[in-house]
Amino acid sequence: MKIRLIDIEDTRNPVVNQILGELDRKKNEAASTGNEELANDCWRELEALKVNIKYIEAFEKIKSKRYRDAWIDLERCEIDVNSIKINSDSGFFIASRCHFIEKQVPKWQSLYPYCLFISPGFKVGYYTCRICNHRIRPRSRCSHIKGKIYNGELCVHEAHDVEMLEISLVRNPVQKYSVAHNDETLDFSLINYLSDFLDNAFENWEAHWTRMSFPMERFSRVDPGSDCPCKSGKKFEECCINEKEISIPHVDFEFFKKIPDEKTRVRFPY
């Protein structure tokens, strides 16, 4: 059955939940009868549909300025799309729009001002395989490969006897959801600007990171003790305050549709 799945209203169509339920039922039935090929096919269809829904929900949250919630959904999409990619051929990966989502998620993430994350450190007693419950040891492993699907179930290694050891602040976290910032202090103007041009989650766009120079008089409202607009990490009074012009980071957005001329002007952030 083919359904329209473009915007948030589509995800609320009762037919979508019916399809999710039917795929899950078929997967479990196939797994119980030993039809591994069908169980795995149902897993792929089910997970691809879920990740499409999650990506649409992330876009809707961005449009409604719920940036933290959208960030968490985008990370979930990133993880789930990778699992689908590992367990499917390129034809399915493209046709299911997972390839599109895989390309777009990092671009959305790159526009976020988040740069500091909480990273917990754990001591794990042992791991077991979710498929066969085998206790994983360096010289005693089961035949199942972590990240692959078996009879409609994803193989993961489950941790046991977990002990918290430390919490660190990092810039490149394993889990991106653990943002250490207060959103009220951050600038989401790039994401807000972009989302205003997009009508749905599946419109294509590109972001080109460059720099642009502006005359000093444009920065008259910048306090000398503030961070320099050039993003050198120095204070304005210690950096570019005596220059004739300042080169600042700039993003050129490329859209694959006609944009009204009045909306294409450069937006100056100061």
Image (cartoon, rainbow, N blue to C red):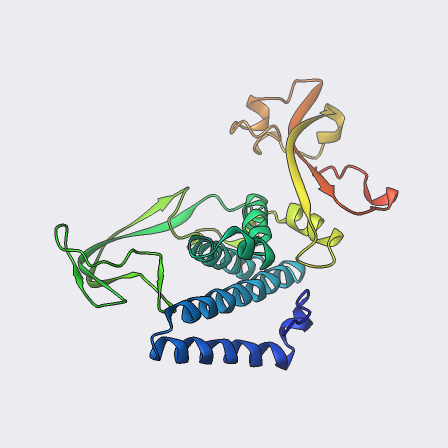
**x, y (%) of residue 9?**
68, 72
Q: Quadrant of residue 263?
A: top right
Residue reaching furthest right? Answer: 261
Q: Where 125 sits versus 244, above or below?
A: below
Give whichever of 238, 172 is nearer the camera: 172
**Residue at 54% across, 57% down:** 92
**x, y (%) of residue 238?**
55, 22
**Residue at 51% across, 80% down:** 22
**x, y (%) of residue 175?**
39, 53
In the picture provided, is 123 more to the left or to the right than 69? left
The image quadrant where one finds the C terminus is: top right
**Residue at 52% across, 60% down:** 73
**Residue at 37% across, 51% down:** 118
Q: Quadrant of residue 133?
A: bottom left
Give whichever of 229, 15 is nearer the camera: 15
In the picture provided, is 216 more to the left or to the right than 233? right
Give whichever of 226, 36 is nearer the camera: 36
The image quadrant where one finds the N terminus is: bottom right
**x, y (%) of residue 31?**
36, 75
Q: How many marks?
A: 0
